[in-house]
Amino acid sequence: MKKLLLYLVSVVFFVAACSTGNEFATYDRQLNKQQSQVDSLKTVTNNIQTEIDNLQNSTVDKLQNIKGRLVVLDNIDQKIDSMESRLLIMENRLEMQQNSIKELFDTTTAGENAAQSQTPQTSEEIYNYALQLHMNGEYQKSIEDLTQLIHSYPDCELSANSYYWMGENYFSLEQYETAMYNFDKVIQNYPNSNKVVDAKLKIAMCLIGMKEYSGALTQLNKIKSNHPNYPKLNLVEEKIEWLNQQ
């Protein structure tokens, strides 16, 4: 009887154990399935978070880009304002220059009318007027007056000086050959004139202007040898030194 009872108890425990094991297996499968779902949700959540982060970074970059463009636009506006101010200043200056030109034109016209009413007549007046034109940079007009003087008063004492200043006018116009012709006129036709040595120096300067350095050096050395007391000897020596370096 005891053995039977023990047997029955054992059977009951065995059945209970089997039943419990099946329940555990079921629970385990359910837990695994839920864990898989949780992991899947985590993956989705991570992906969403990554997209959010990327979106935030993109938004920050775009905002910075927009800010940069706003700064550029602000700078452009400032430059436009500055240019408008400069344009206004230039317009004012242009108006002032136009007024100055008009005043100068009126003054020049009045001066020309006055000059025409006081046209020089004597050789001295023509010569002095021609010199003044040269000093004012009106070389061509000075040449015209000196030519008139030479033709009208061929034997006057100012002829040598007239040829010399003709040469100076042509030299200023960089017409070196014509300038040399007039300087040579002084040397050949008026050997006793106080402009002879000056004319020789200017011939050398013409040769330098024409880049004929050898001829210019020869001319300057002659001046140095033949005219040791020439007041412009320092200039002659400076030109000689310069030519020796070429």
Image (cartoon, rainbow, N blue to C red):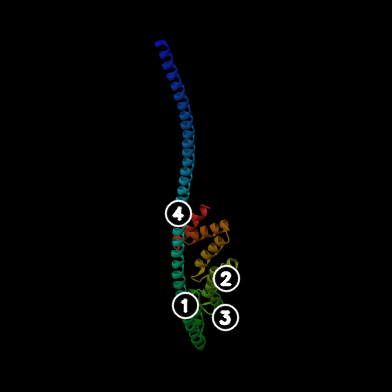
Cα distance in 3D space between marks 4 and 2: 80 Å
Cα distance in 3D space between marks 4 and 1: 47 Å
Cα distance in 3D space between marks 3 and 4: 83 Å
Q: Is disc 1 surrounded by few (<14), some (14 to 19) or many (20+) residues within 10 Å?
A: few
Q: Is disc 3 surrounded by few (<14), some (14 to 19) or many (20+) residues within 10 Å?
A: some
> Do the residues under discs 4 and 1 have CB atoms within 8 angstroms?
no
Residue 164 drawn at (x, y percent): 53, 71
Q: Name the residue located 44 percent from the left edge and 67 percent from the top edge.
A: 81
Residue 228 visible at all: no
Q: Is residue 215 above or below residue 105?
A: above
Mark count: 4
Residue 172 drawn at (x, y percent): 53, 69
- Ranked by sequence position, the earlier of labels 2 and 1 is 1
Q: Which mark is residue 95?
A: 1
Mark nearer the viewer, 3 or 4: 4
Q: Which mark is residue 148?
A: 3
Frontmost residue, 237 versus 133: 133
- Ranked by sequence position, the earlier of labels 4 and 2 is 4
Would residue 130 appear left or right of 5 to someone viewing this image? right
Q: Residue furthest left?
A: 2
> Which amino acid, by three-letter code, is at mark 3?
Gln
Q: Secondary structure at mark 2?
A: helix
> Which amino acid, by three-letter code, is at mark 4?
Leu
Residue 58 visible at all: yes
Q: Secondary structure at mark 3?
A: helix
Q: Which residue is mark 2?
A: 182
